[in-house]
Image (cartoon, rainbow, N blue to C red):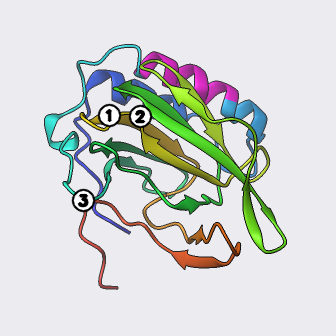
Amino acid sequence: MPDIPAPDLPLPLARFVGVLDRLGKPPEADEAEVLEVVVAAMRQLVSQDDWLDPAFTRPHPQYYQQYLLYADPAGRFSVVSFVWGPGQKTPIHDHGTWGVIGMLRGAEIGQHFRLETGACLPDGAEERLQPGDTAVVSPTVGDLHVVRNAFDDRVSISIHAYGADIGQQHRHVYDASTGAARAFVSGYSNVSKSTA
């Protein structure tokens, strides 16, 4: 279990965490209901851009950053900021749990994929998120995607909530041409990995 950031969260983030905390423990909570509640709370959270600590907004020159903002001590959920440097993107990947993305600054473009025999194929059109917009992922509504910064000349930041401690979650990246999966655990850019 990683160290959890201090409980003195900015008020908008503390309210958002409170909403997630009240949702209950899986499998008590129905995923569709959870997503509806979390999307509404995420829209509120990203409707203002004055609460995110600058420590969680720093880009890396080569790859995107996933900063832990809060991890539920029981592992039920986590909240992170994704900081996208100019032109940065993810590989095709899954989550293994529900996720709600809220765009805070800049813009990002997501492309869902479906796994076919021998390949990962685009599934639908790309989706552009502007500040205040939200999107969802989950094994039931679509869990494979690529996300990239919509800009080649500036940083974009999105806030993500997941139904697990996403930095400890066992996940997969996929080869687009073969569909082959490779397991990974993402960790966090601001938390040391446990040696246990």
Q: Answer whether labels 1 and 2 touch (C-beta < 8 Å).
A: yes
Q: CA distance from mark 1 to mark 2?
A: 8 Å
Amino acid bearing label 2 = Ala
Give the label on residue 156, or none.
1
Viewer-nearest residue: 7 or 185: 185
**In the rendered structure, which segment of residues is drawn in magenta?**
36-45
Q: Which residue is mark 2?
A: 150
Disc 3 or 1, which lies upstream in sequence? Answer: 3
Amino acid bearing label 3 = Gln
Viewer-nearest residue: 116 or 17: 116
> Residue 55: x and y, percent?
15, 42
Q: Is residue 39 magenta?
A: yes
> Residue 93: x and y, percent?
58, 61
Q: Indicate the secondary structure of the residue bearing disc 3.
A: loop
Question: Seen in the image, is 121 located left or right of residue 167?
Answer: right
Q: Is residue 20 magenta?
A: no
Disc 2 or 3, which lies upstream in sequence? Answer: 3
Disc 1 or 2, which lies upstream in sequence? Answer: 2
The local crowd at label 1, few if under 14, some if 14 to 19, many if 20 or more residues have their Cα within 10 Å, is many
Q: Indicate the secondary structure of the residue bearing disc 2.
A: loop
Q: Which residue is mark 3?
A: 62
Q: CA distance from mark 2 to mark 3?
A: 16 Å
